[in-house]
Amino acid sequence: MIDIIPAIDIIDGKCVRLTKGDYNSKTIYNDSPAEVAKEFEALGFKRLHVVDLDGAKSKHVVNTEVLKEITSATNLVVDFGGGIKTEEDINLAFENGAKMVTIGSIAVTRPDLCQKWIEQYGADRIILGADVRDGKISINGWLDNSDENLIPFLRKYISMGVKNILCTDISKDGTLKGPAIELYREIMDTFPGIYLIASGGVASNEDIAELQRNGIPAVVFGKAYYEGRIDVNKLWL
């Protein structure tokens, strides 16, 4: 059974969603991310993906108080990403209740530091964020493109011991036009032992079922739920 992970994206302390990473396309869904997290827990979810969009844009974590509110109000296993660039940032994430952190931009700019974190905290607590636009890794809240190609980028970190990979096809994110099945199949065919979390484009229960049929271990979704397009009661059937 595919692992199904709801997402909360945060700007100005509020639960929002963007389209294709465009900060000008922000839609606010709830003023209290902690209340949304409690709703997810009540529905039966065990995991939660939290993204500090302010942090991603500012290049340092910002919404740690909101993270603390979420982890204090629920028993959800929370992974937290967005703006984790320094020792202080990663420590703040863990100190405020995150069980795992997602590292993306820093994995491009400071692989030496990321390797240190993998060794220090353990590969099980690190999720490699691979945000892809036209085959290249994007960084800094998707505002900048790097020269890193996806497959070599993943191979480098898998060789360091990384097992958990969150891959977002930016062209699909927030569009509700379906996930990048071929991209995820290519990743799983190349690295069959990894725990791949698909992200971007999920619009329905059928999209999640299709990911499962293609052997994708996990999926993150957000906008489809907030827009009422997913029937949670049928997710585990």
Image: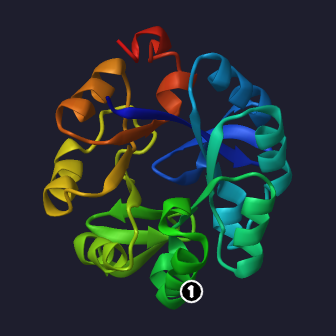
- Residue 143, percent from left and from top: 53, 68
Closer to the camera in the image, 219 or 31: 219
Q: Residue at x 24, y 57 (%)?
A: 193
Q: Residue at x 78, y 27 (%)?
A: 35
**Residue 186 falls in which quadrant of the image?**
bottom left
**Residue 175 falls in which quadrant of the image?**
top left
- Residue 139, percent from left and from top: 50, 71
For this view, does 211 lie left or right of residue 66? left
* In this view, 161 is above or below 115: above
In the structure shown, which secondary structural element does the residue marked by tag 1 occupy?
helix
* In this view, 219 is above or below 116: above
The image quadrant where one finds the C terminus is top left
Residue assigned mark 1: 113
For this view, does 125 lie left or right of residue 67? left
For this view, does 12 lie left or right of residue 178? right
Task: Give the amino acid type for the residue marked by disc 1 in the picture.
Answer: Leu
What colour scheme does the image use? rainbow
For this view, does 93 lie left or right of residue 141? right
The image quadrant where one finds the N terminus is top left
- Residue 8, percent from left and from top: 63, 39
Q: Residue at x 27, y 64 (%)?
A: 134
